Image: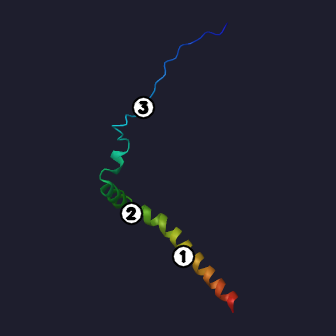
Amino acid sequence: MGKEAVKMKAVVYALSPFQQKIMSGLWKDFPGKIEQKVSENWLNAVLFLTPLISTYAYAQQYKEKEKLAYRY
């Protein structure tokens, strides 16, 4: 049971400097894609963002009240 050398074929990927269209499909019709995602998932977005925004607003209001109470 000796070790045998195994020939492996390597696959090399390269980009041509003349054709670098990697992410061109991502930006194609970008506003339309965003509009579609928002229109399909608006309820989930509202249910996700409402607690985040309200918690942030409460924390800012609490901090401001605490600063004012400490001031006088």
**Most foreground residue, 29 or 12:** 12
Residue type beneath disc 1: Ala
Instruction: Check disc 3 and give the amino acid type.
Output: Ala
Which residue is labeled 3 in the image? 14
Task: Give the answer, above or below, for where 32 lies relative to 72.
Answer: above
1 or 3: mark nearer the eye: 3
Query: Residue drawn 56% across and 13% down?
Result: 6
Residue 35: x percent and y percent?
33, 59
Task: Give me the residue at 67% from left, 7% from top.
Answer: 2
Of 56 and 71, which appears nearest the observer? Answer: 71
Label for residue 42? 2
Residue 15, relative to residue 41: is it above or below?
A: above
- Label 3 sits on a secondary structure element that is loop
Q: Which residue is at the front of the view, 32 or 10? A: 10
Q: Secondary structure at mark 2?
A: helix
Percent position of residue 15, x then y: 40, 34
Q: Which residue is mark 1?
A: 57
Pointer 1 or 3: first along the chain: 3
Q: How is the image coloured?
A: rainbow
Q: Which residue: 48% across, 64% down?
A: 48
Residue most toward the top? Answer: 1
Q: Earlier in the sequence, mark 1 or mark 2?
A: 2
